[in-house]
Amino acid sequence: MDESIAYLKEKFGLGEVDVHTYSPLTLAYMGDAAYELVIRTMLVDRGNRQPSKLHRLSSGLVKAGTQAAMAEAIAPLLTEEEMQVYRRGRNAKSATIAKNATVSDYRRATGFEALMGYLYLRGEQRRMIDLIHAGLAAAGKIEGESR
């Protein structure tokens, strides 16, 4: 487990939980935040900008269409267990869908977020970051890198 997650659990008295017991939508909820933090860190590290510009840049990377494309790109890299988590998230029935996304993109994005949440909660931040990088690179979303 990543040291920062272990420290967070220790500091707040959080116990170990089997992440397999979480619903896919709970994993997606956590994955949405973890993915957003990676994206915001990446953008802020590229230079001090106005928050409105940062928001505009990040919204293009966190939208369902981009996440769906990333999910497709990283699928060959996933272990069987990771693929099962992705499928559970993709097939989860959500009460809502994004306003600017197709149902298909929204479901694949939910699967992607569920996978990110799963990896985060397991303390596998390196794996999560590697998959995010691979997905962004395949989607041509990393400066200087493309397919």
Image (cartoon, grey):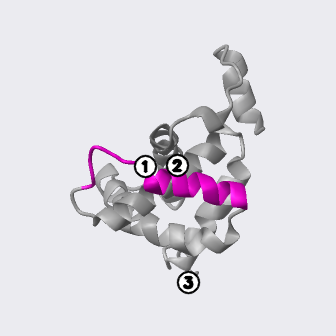
Query: Taking 38 as reference, is 20 above or below it?
Result: above
**Residue 22 found in image quarter:** top right
Task: Name the residue located 47 percent from the left edge and 49 percent from the top edge.
Answer: 36
In the rendered image, is residue 140 in sight? yes
Residue 136 belongs to the span the image colors magenta: no
- Relative to 57, is 14 above or below? above
Give amino acid for label 2.
Ala
Q: Position of residue 120 (x, y in %)?
A: 63, 43
Closer mark to the observer between disc 2 and disc 1: 1
Q: Earlier in the sequence, mark 2 or mark 1?
A: 1
Chief secondary structure of the magenta span? helix
**Foreground residue among 127 and 49:** 127
Measure the alpha-carbon separation of dots 3 and 1. Answer: 31 Å
Residue that label 2 marks = 114
Residue 125 drawn at (x, y percent): 69, 48
Secondary structure under badge 2?
A: helix
Q: Residue at x 60, y 33 (%)?
A: 21
What's drawn in magenta, residue-wise? 80-98
Callout 3: SS:
loop
**Depicted 19 relative to depicted 71: above or below:** above
Residue at mark 3: 146
Image depth: mark 2 or mark 3 in front: 2
Q: Nearer the viewer, residue 66 or 114?
A: 114
Question: How far is the residue under mark 2 from the one under mark 3?
Answer: 25 Å
Report the amino acid beneath label 1. Ala
**Pointer 2 and pointer 1: residues touching (CB < 8 Å)?**
yes
Q: Is residue 70 left or right of residue 3?
A: left
Estimate the spatial distance between the alpha carbons at disc 2 and disc 1, rounded to whole Å. Answer: 10 Å
Image point 52% across, 41% down: which residue?
Answer: 27
Residue, disc 1: 92
